Amino acid sequence: MTTAERIIDAVRKGFDTLLYFAVMAWKEDFRDEVKRAGTVGEQRPTMAVLGNGPSLKGELEELLCDPAARDFMAVNFFAEDERFMVLRPAYYVLSDPMFFRRTSLRGRIEQFYRTLNERVTWPMNLYVQYYNPEHFDYRAHLTNPLIRIVRFHTITYYGFRAVRHWLFNHGLGSGNFGTVVQVGELIALQLGYRRVELYGVDHTLLEGLTVDGENRLCRADRHFYDDDTTPHLKPMMQKVPEVPYTMAVYLQEVADLFRGHELLRDYADSLGAEIVNCTRSSMIDAYRRRG
């Protein structure tokens, strides 16, 4: 990088830093609710973050052999699976806008919250976005007193590395680089876990992409809770607002997502912690893979 490029980069990051603090002051606050809530019970050395990729179906069998060896963090619709009752995750993360904004999936979301209320019989921290433009009332939908609702900050910071790590250390910034799993990784590190394992985090996000005759970007998306039938290609829609993805927008989001994993790896390194990719089929190349 030339001197001129370094100056431009410093100016850009300086502007990003000022903008970040201005937006935080306007939209959110500077409280560290993750650290304030703390851990649930006695903390084990390892946190296992359970993604919803299709590989989780096989990996769950291994985890069920010794569920007491690690703490568990679940995401999205995992509570609907019967194995949720066996693993009893003490940590749960919801990040997708469909969980707190009005979308065509509102009926399924209401059923999901009823399932959480009924099934959770142990203390749980449920992490949700601070960003809540429609003022969705989580407590009205989650009346189970064992579920503690904890807000995480949602504004990402891309400026200076040292500032980013300082923000993370103080519960600011956000790991929301494109997937709920990344939020979970950051929360686990902020809670003091020194080994974070990823399961069901396939991230095969470029697999099966195609454009149909109407110029719509399509993909056959799969999750571990799907049946074994061959999925039909369907147009890819952004969550909020529900508009079709273009190839350019989608590829940019995927690039940001994988770059986010690199930033989380660097943060873990700064803490003397490690994120280990235990998903054999995963496309993530930022973390050490389990042998």
Image (cartoon, rainbow, N blue to C red):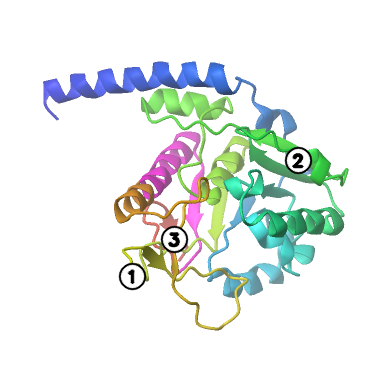
Q: Is residue 132 left or right of residue 275?
A: right
> Are the residues at dot 1 and dot 3 in contact (C-beta closer than 8 Å)?
no
Residue type at the position of mark 2: Tyr
Element carrying mark 3? loop
* Residue at mark 2: 138
Instruction: Count the marks.
Output: 3
Q: Residue at image x 76%, y 59%? A: 111
* Residue at mark 1: 212
Q: Residue at image x 65%, y 67%? A: 63
Mark 3 is surrounded, within 10 Å at the Cα level, by few (under 14), some (14 to 19) or many (20 or more) other residues, namely: many
Please tell me which of labels 1 and 3 falls first in the chain: 1
Mark number, residue 236: 3
Up/down of 237 relative to 265, above or below: below
Element carrying mark 2? helix
Nearer to us of marks 3 and 2 is 3
Q: Position of residue 137 (x, y in %)?
A: 76, 37
Mark-to-mark CA distance, 2 and 1? 39 Å
**Observer-nearest of 83 and 64:** 83
Q: Give the magenta range.
A: 256-280
